[in-house]
Amino acid sequence: MKKTSTRLADGRELLYYDAADDRDRDAHDPRPLTPVATTSEVRRDVLLDEYVAIASHRQDRTYLPPTDACPLCPSREGHRSEIPAADYDVAVFENRFPSLAGDSGRCEVVCFTSDHHSSFADLTEEQAALVLEAWTDRTAELSRLPSVEQVFCFENRGAEIGVTLGHPHGQIYGYPYVTPRTARMLDALRAHAEAHPEAPAGRAVNLFDQVVARERADGSRIVLDTGHWVAFVPYAAHWPYEVHLYPARRVPDLRDLDDAARAEFPAVYLELLRRFDRIFGPDQPPTPYIAAWHQAPVRHPLRGEFALHLELFTIRRTSGKLKVLAGSESGMGAFINDVSPEAAAIRLREVASEK
């Protein structure tokens, strides 16, 4: 893998990740861009002890442009995009309309492929492995920033999710705080350890280890288990179709994956994404989803006890119908799921790729 760092016309960083070492990346960005000006600030909600990013400048961000004006496609004559090169494998750049910036963190865009009409599920295993390398490298780099406490790599796919650009891409957020969902996991992790100072023989003390062990022992919600990765529908799934993917060896973030898990990941992840596209049948449009990497906070005392995992879920509950957050979910954060986790797991096993 070859990594090349350069700058866009307004000073934002752009990085190319190429599978071949001989790719020349000296393309100049000729656009007359003015420096990025943001209004990002982070405010604390004292009642919930949560932080909210205020970023009013994002109202002007690009919204569903036509294909020939896509800012994530390679540049060509007559169309200069965010990526000056005529082609690329994987490209990462600072978001021009960031939710977080400066002392309030950092936001980056990750373009998985130069093919506008593709999707992550269409990538080859070699391409998916390169994306994993990019995620890992950005996790390492952002973790070094003093303003970043947690690194979040994720992909939103589908207009139903709220995606504003159709080109296959994801994002990476460097939060200046520990996110609420992670904080709740850490609280549960701590409480479990305090309640079980000495576990019985053969029982896992770490809460994440115990969750994975229980799912493997039960088996009814396992979607796939390859030796180095295990994927299952969680016992108390929030979403109609939701899968959690864990490496067999617990690690705090992407940087710590061993070579075996890293080598096996592309095939495992591509298989899960392709199954998601088959859940609702061949006549349905591509399944909208969110794929979210949960990584340990950079400097938290329980960092070593946290378990890296990916949560993949869709808001589509059945053909032509979405799981819309109603009063209970949006108003009180109390979820009600229309699909049993066991039924979801059965369906996700039924749509496995033919060997």
Image: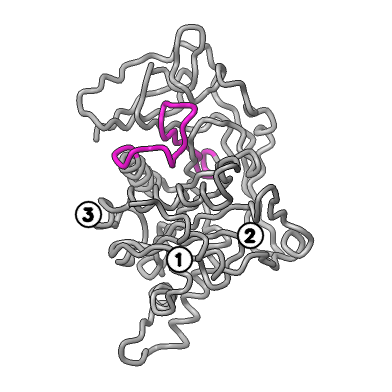
Residue 222, given in percent of the width and then of the height, sits at: 43, 68
**Compared to 179, does 94 lie above or below?**
above
| Circle 2: residue type | Glu
Q: Which mark is on residue 232?
A: 1
Tell me if 158 is positioned left or right of 88 in this view: right
Q: Nearer the viewer, mark 1 or mark 3?
A: 1
Q: Is residue 221 left or right of residue 258?
A: right
Q: Earlier in the sequence, mark 3 or mark 2?
A: 2
Amino acid on which disc 3 is placed: Asp
Determine the residue positioned at 39% across, 63% down: 224
Please state, as top left, top right, bottom left or bottom right, where the N terminus lies in the image.
Answer: top left
Q: Identify which residue, 11 or 128, lies in the foreground.
A: 128
Residue matched to label 3: 259
Among the two numbered marks 1 and 3 on one chain, the one whose residue lies closer to the N terminus: 1
Q: Is residue 54 above or below residue 9?
A: below
Residue at image position (36%, 53%) is 268
